[in-house]
Image (cartoon, grey):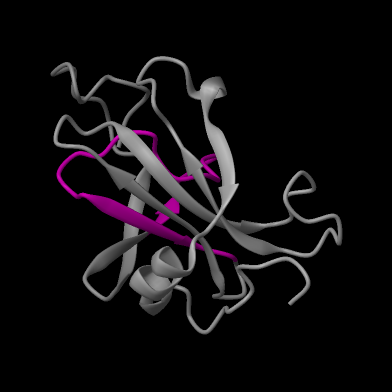
């Protein structure tokens, strides 16, 4: 996976992530060198998963047919969604391919939780107060 938009516009760059496994058919990636996040574009996959070093779910990213990031489910504290400062499953939506600062942040719906829970490794906290 390369930098923002490079693969999508046909500019192939060296890989900076490696596949370390799969969960329900979705590749689990680990960064190489100083890469600690998931890529913002995909080479061929529709989604990637990242785990914390302890093996627990950290992030699931979805990409459109043009390889751009569109949706992310994260598991970390989000103070604007839950004041407890505990990690919570939540959604970031990326409506703009060129400006990732314009992402939205919201709680998951029950339908989304049910649809994606097979990727979360038993994490059930998707509502504040739980």
User: In the image, is residue 101 above or below residue 21?
Assistant: above
The answer to which quarter of the image holds residue 3 is top left
Q: Is residue 48 magenta?
A: yes
The answer to which quarter of the image holds residue 68 is top left
Q: Residue furthest front?
A: 110
Q: Which residues are magenta?
A: 29-52
Would you say 28 lies left or right of 86 here?
A: left
Asked whether 33 or 36 is in front, the reply is 36
| Residue depicted at 33% across the width and 54% down the height | 48
Residue 106 image point, x, y percent = 58, 46
Q: Residue furthest bottom?
A: 122
Q: Main secondary structure of the magenta part?
A: loop
| Residue depicted at 62% across the width and 75% down the height | 54
Q: Is residue 99 magenta?
A: no
Residue 96 image point, x, y percent = 39, 20
Quadrant (top left, top right, bottom left, bottom right) of the N terminus: top left
User: In the image, is residue 94 above or below residue 110?
Assistant: above
| Residue depicted at 58% across the width and 65% down the height | 52
Residue 122 image point, x, y percent = 52, 84
Would you say 70 lies left or right of 81 here?
A: left
Say how many tags the image has. Answer: 0
Residue 95 image point, x, y percent = 39, 26
The answer to which quarter of the image holds residue 128 is bottom right
Would you say 85 lies left or right of 16 here?
A: right
| Residue depicted at 86% across the width and 62% down the height | 84
Quadrant (top left, top right, bottom left, bottom right) of the C terminus: bottom right
């Amino acid at each position: 996976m390369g930098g923002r938009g490079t693969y999508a516009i046909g500019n192939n760059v060296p890989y900076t992530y490696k596949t370390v496994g799969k969960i329900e058919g979705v590749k689990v990636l680990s960064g190489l060198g100083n890469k600690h996040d998931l890529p913002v574009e995909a080479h061929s996959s529709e989604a990637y998963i990242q785990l914390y070093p302890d093996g627990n779910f950290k992030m699931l990213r979805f990409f459109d047919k043009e390889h751009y990031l569109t949706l992310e489910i994260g598991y970390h504290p989000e103070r604007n969604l839950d004041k407890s400062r505990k990690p919570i499953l939540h959604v970031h939506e990326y409506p703009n391919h060129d400006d990732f600062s314009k992402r939205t942040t919201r709680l998951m719906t029950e339908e989304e939780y049910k649809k994606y829970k097979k990727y979360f490794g038993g994490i059930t906290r998707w509502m504040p107060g739980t």
